[in-house]
Amino acid sequence: MAHRTAEVDATVLRRVASGDRAALADLYAEHAPWLVLRLSRRCNDPGLVDEVVQDTFLAVWKGARRWDGRGEVAAWIWGIGVRRLVDALRRRPVATATLDPHVDGIVLAAEEQVLLGVEYGDLGGALARLSPELRAVVQATVLDGLTTREAGRLLGIPAGTVKTRMLRAKAALREDLA
């Protein structure tokens, strides 16, 4: 199945921004399947993933005017979706938001454990101490799972700059966590 071009997505998103519900349905049909798949790799709770996907497209509907035209629409949607997932995981009761992979009969996916560890562990503090530019690259590539190219589009910087900032971020994190 061929995916449509970034230009078509941009046109559809502009229609969403003007209040076109059919355009939102079109955007959902094009992007929801891969969003479910990618979020499912980070969270093994299908109900939570479905809720996050719905919240993501509600945010797209409400915030389509805020898309500034830089980067691909898919990367913008992914950024919203993964932030919604992290927020949903944070809202879980403290008893399930531990690093124990078996809590109250719920088995947390490995990536879900890492996401929780980022917030509650030493890594969270180390990430918070990074400059905003370095933290954004780590967020996009490591936590959001974007490629260097996708992260560059999302952040509005060249892929080479993403690589350079990631090298600097890794060095800073190694030093901070040593």
Image (cartoon, rainbow, N blue to C red):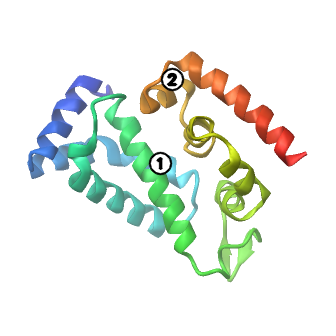
Whether 112 is drawn above or below 19: the answer is below
- The residue wearing badge 1 is 37
Which of the two marks, 1 or 2, is nearer to us in this view?
A: 2
Q: In this view, does 48 lie to the left or right of 115?
A: left
Task: Report the residue at 59% width, 36% height from top.
Answer: 141
Mark 2, secondary structure of its residue: helix
- Give whichever of 23, 66 is nearer the camera: 66
Instruction: Name the residue nearer the viewer: 35 or 121.
Output: 121
Q: Which amino acid does label 2 sit on?
A: Arg
Q: In this view, does 145 lie above or below 63?
A: above
| Residue 55, percent from left and from top | 34, 62
Q: How many numbered tags mark residues here? A: 2
Eyeballing the image, is 96 above or below 36?
A: below
Spot occupied by residue 19 in the image (x, y as percentages of width and height): 9, 50
| Residue 114 sits in quarter | bottom right
Find residue 77 and name its label: none
Q: Element under label 1?
A: helix
Residue depicted at 65% across the width and 80% down the height: 94
Q: Is residue 92 left or right of residue 103?
A: left
Real-space CA distance between mark 1 and mark 2, rounded to the nearest whole angstrom: 20 Å
Within-10-Å neighbours for mark 2: few <14, some 14–19, many 20+: some
Q: Which residue matches tag 2?
A: 149
Quadrant of the rendered structure where residue 171 is?
Answer: top right
Residue in front for this viewpoint, 106 or 16: 16
Q: Give the residue displayed 47% in from the left and 48% down from the top.
A: 37
Using the rendered image of the protein, determine whether residue 12 is visible from the camera's viewpoint.
yes
